[in-house]
């Protein structure tokens, strides 16, 4: 018998599970979920100003609409609000009797991004649960 060769009857199989690849995959998934979780908590639906397949507004009840005009004016429904700081108490007053705390934001595409973020922050401070940004279909 040669050195290093075994007899055919003495072979034994390894019955241990190699968990290293499993642990590697789980760590990668953990990192992905840790990075993605804070992004899912914001709850802000962002749509581009012109989208070919934009969903229609739900018509179950009259939606509350915040409008930011091109010149920076703020409107809640048809009522004018002077500043984003004054928007929070106005929204709290309007939403206290409503079951649904969903609000739609109409913002002109030429409004500075900072102004839109101020309005969104004021809405969040007022306790709005869902803030949808409204878009329209592109014109042919």
Image (spheres, grey):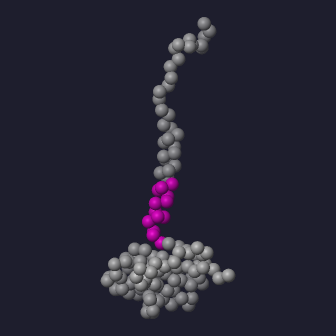
The percent coordinates of residue 67 (x first, y second) are 49, 86
Q: 64 or 80: which is nearer to us?
A: 64
For the C terminus, give its image quadrant: bottom right
Task: Give the residue drawn at x 57%, y 80%.
Answer: 136
Task: Give the residue drawn at x 41%, y 87%.
Answer: 86
Task: Give the residue drawn at x 59%, y 82%.
Answer: 109
The residue range painted magenta reads 32-44
The percent coordinates of residue 16 (x first, y second) are 47, 29
Residue 95 appears in the rendering = yes
Q: 120 or 131: which is nearer to us?
A: 131
Residue 125 appears in the rendering = no
Q: Residue at the far front: name it.
A: 60
Task: Give the residue drawn at x 50%, y 41%.
Answer: 22
The percent coordinates of residue 124 (x first, y second) are 41, 76
- Please say whether residue 37 is one of the residues in the magenta stretch: yes
Which of the 4 quarters of the picture holds residue 103? bottom left
Which of the 4 quarters of the picture holds residue 80? bottom left
The percent coordinates of residue 64 (x first, y second) are 43, 84
Q: Residue at the far left: name it.
A: 97
């Amino acid at each position: 018998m040669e050195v290093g060769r075994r007899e055919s009857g003495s072979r034994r199989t390894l019955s241990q599970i190699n968990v290293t690849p499993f642990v590697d995959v789980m760590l990668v998934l953990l990192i992905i979920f840790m990075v993605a979780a804070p992004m899912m908590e914001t709850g802000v639906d962002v749509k581009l100003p012109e989208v070919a397949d934009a969903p229609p507004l739900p018509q179950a009840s009259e939606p509350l609409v915040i409008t930011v005009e091109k010149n920076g004016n703020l409107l809640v429904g048809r009522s004018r609000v002077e500043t984003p700081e004054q928007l929070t108490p106005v929204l709290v007053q309007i939403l206290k009797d409503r079951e649904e705390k969903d609000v739609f934001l109409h913002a002109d595409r030429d409004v500075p991004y900072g102004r839109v973020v101020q309005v969104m922050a004021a809405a969040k401070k007022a306790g709005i649960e869902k803030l949808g940004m409204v878009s329209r279909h592109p014109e042919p």
